[in-house]
Every structure is written in C-alpha cells, then in structure tokens.
Amino acid sequence: MKILLAIDGSPAALEAARHGLQLARDGLRTGFVLATVQDPTYLYEMVLAPNAEVLERVSGAVGARALAGAEELFTAAGVAYEREIGSGDPATTLVEIAQRYGCTAILMGARGMGALRGVLLGSVSQGVLQRAAVPVIIVKHEPETEQ
C-alpha cells in the first residue's frame, strides 16, 4: 500500500500529514508520497525570466517550501517518504502523481491554501474526489479558537 499525501503548506494539509503519520503509528504498513502542485508558468513569467532554468528553480523552491512542514513531521517521526513537486491543475496533477507512483489511496486536507479559489471554481479536494480511481480520505482541520 502507498498513500499520496497532498501538501500545500496549509494547516489543513499538515493535519492530513499528522493523520497519515498516526495511521503508520497505529500499524498501517504503507509508504507515503508527499506531493505538492504549483501553478503552471504563465507567458508573462516566461518573458520576465532570463531562461527556463530560472523558472524551474523558482517553482521548485516554492514547492519545497510547501512540502517543508510535512517533511519535518515525517523526518521527526522517522517515517520514510518520497516527494514530488508537480505543475498544473492541482486536482488533475495530484491524481496523475498518485497513478504514477502506484498509490492505493490519496490523503488530503479539507481546505488548503486555495480557499477563495475553491469557492469560485470548486475545491481541489472535490476535484480529486471526482477524478481519482482510488479511495480519497479528506481530513478536516479544526481551526484553533481563541480563549
């Protein structure tokens, strides 16, 4: 069994990562793929960037930042993982990554960084649910309340 963990750097995504780690602590024998998807390069970015290598480095740096919190959790827990930084439509790309790695499930937060976009276009989790051929587990994040 292998689980794709959709990570965008949001508290909801980190909650999903914690849930995945708890499954592993509870005895689920699985591998993990931490995956994030960056927006595709747009024409004005291509015009402004000196070359394609610069665009690739910037996209990779943003993706690495998005994965950093989840990677810290997995490293601290001593749980091995693979990582993937994709580009394109998040829901479609996450499903493609899951297929490429042979994942048997997808685990993701209920609401990530794209909250406003989700209201306008339909959330990434909804898109993954519609496209995925494997089970999708959506972890709800309880926002902290002030006391």
Image (spheres, rainbow, N blue to C red):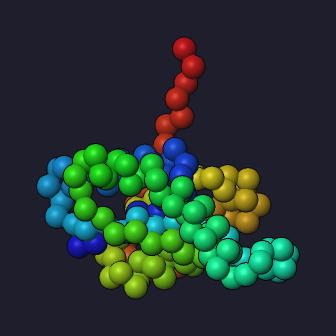
- In this orientation, which residue lies closer to the viewer: 98 or 125? 98
- Residue at 49 percent of width and 37 percent of height: 142
User: Would residue 27 be found to the left or right of residue 107 on screen?
Assistant: left
Q: Quadrant of residue 118?
A: bottom right
- Residue at 54 percent of width and 55 percent of height: 65
Residue 18, percent from left and from top: 35, 47
Vertical side of 117 occupied by 106: above or below? below
- In this orientation, which residue lies closer to the viewer: 56 or 13? 56
User: Would residue 134 be found to the left or right of residue 41 on screen?
Assistant: left
- Residue at 41 percent of width and 52 percent of height: 70
Residue 25, percent from left and from top: 19, 49
- Residue at 57 percent of width and 19 percent of height: 146
Of the 4 image quadrants, the one containing the C terminus is top right
Determine if residue 132 is in view: no
Residue 104, percent from left and from top: 31, 75
Q: Quick one: which residue is furthest to the left in this view?
A: 27
Q: Quick one: which residue is furthest to the bottom in this view?
A: 100
Determine if residue 15 is in view: yes
Q: Quick one: which residue is furthest to the top in this view?
A: 147
